[in-house]
Amino acid sequence: MFSFFRRKKTDDAQPPAKPSTLSAEDLAAAFPKAPAEASAEADLAEAFVQPPVEAPPAEVVIAETPVQAEPATEAAPEPIVVAEPAPVASAPAPQAKVVPAPAPLAYEDVAASSATETDDALIPANAAPAAPAGKVGWRDRLRNSVFARSFGGLFSRNPKLDDDLLEEIETALITADVGVPATTALVESLRKRMKSREFADANALLAALRADLIALLQPVSQPLVIDTQAKPFVILTVGVNGVGKTTTIGKLAKRFKDQGHSLMLAAGDTFRAAAVAQLQIWGERNGVAVVAQGQNADAASVAFDALQAGKARGTSVLIADTAGRLHTQTGLMNELSKIRRVLGKIDDTAPHEVLMVIDGTTGQNALSQVRQFHAAAGVTGLVVTKLDGTAKGGVVFALAREFGIPIRFAGIGERPEDLRVFDPEAFVDALLPQALGSN
């Protein structure tokens, strides 16, 4: 009996036999589903059917070849040569053809230059017709200046002839950049005459102020005269950045060409490619040869080549451009002295005129500029530009009193004819009202 139970226990301790594995087909045959249940299950299976997994595309490996760095000399762009220097020959060479600018220009001086163009294509269709050359008066051009507006408001009423009026005149003169020394001298002269009862009314005082201002400018009213014995007559233009040197040269070229002079231009502003191209546009417009080298060329070398070419051709006038430079930078100022020395190696009298261009909106800083440029280059004449618009204009009186350097031209507009020979009477009359109650 006990052996029976031991055998039974031993049998029970054996692991149960594994059930036979049934496939899904065997289970479906053993337990068939109702039609409705089978349909629902099929729909559910279809709803969650998984798309076959596609094998990922073979990865494409592109072997990278290391890029060899090119030398800096090959990566740098080649300088744009606008015009090659004219060859020097014993006989006069034909006029050099001015090559058009190689690319559109984007610079403020180029825009200003284009604004002087008289072609209908560059003037808006709805623009008012341009006045004939020389017909637009100084007063029309300068009426918006600070000087004109200050005195126009002062004498638009009927001011009383007293010290208060003199104080208002003093304030207006200083505000218009006439400068403290010149203003003090003018007002003190008027005060003495008023106390001596020389003025019957404010109109008489205004007439006296007009006469004093004209007398201050009369000594510097000396037009530029071209010496026809100098072949060529060399004009070296200098000034700080952005005053309008290149545009002024273009306008001067047109003026001298209209007067019958043969001209040549030297593109000495080699720091700016736009300046070379702009000068070339002016040359093409006026039929004037332009001597230029590549960008960053030596300005003295450009001037030297141009003077040689001018002598070979028998040119009447050579106008040499220079790069704008701050008057506080000694190294750049010394470069002007170098240009003078180089020109003197060919003609010991050259340059015959050192023309400094001054922005009329600069104010009293113009005095410091003239002082430094005169020390470096020996300035012999001034051109005051941008007097139209909102320029103060009074700096002209300060320059005349401080230096006595001739003021050759005044820029009162954008067109070539708006570069006028400086006229003290026309200038003062444009700034002051004609009489009480007028502007």
Image: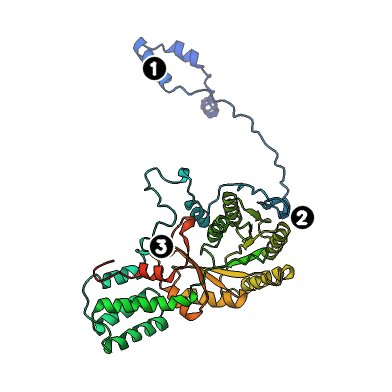
Q: Which mark is residue 43?
A: 1
Q: Is residue 175 left or right of residue 250?
A: left
In front: label 1 or label 3 = 3
User: Residue beneath label 3, please?
Assistant: 388
Secondary structure beneath label 2: loop
Q: Is residue 146 above or below residue 163?
A: above
Disc 2 to disc 1: CB gap under 8 Å: no
Few, some or many residues within 10 Å of mark 3 (<14, 14–19, 20+):
many
Instruction: State the separation of the CA atoms marked 1 and 3.
Output: 89 Å
Tell me if 324 is positioned left or right of 395 in this view: right
Disc 1 crowd, CA 10 A, few/some/many (<14, 14-19, 20+)? few
- Relative to 302, residue 54 above or below: above
Q: How is the image coloured?
A: rainbow
Query: Which part of the image, by quadrant, shows the C terminus?
Result: bottom left
Q: Amino acid at mark 1?
A: Asp
Horizontal arrangement in the rendering, residue 20 relative to residue 214 (left or right): right
Answer whether residue 140 is visible to the viewer in this image.
Answer: yes
Of the two numbered discs 1 and 3 on the same chain, state the one appearing first in sequence.
Answer: 1
Q: Residues within 10 Å of mark 2 (few under 14, many from 20)?
A: few
Q: Earlier in the sequence, mark 3 or mark 2?
A: 2
Q: Label 2: which residue?
A: 91
Residue drawn where x is 55% and y is 50% of the image: 105
Residue 39 point in image, percent of width and height: 37, 13
Q: Nearer the viewer, residue 210 or 299?
A: 210
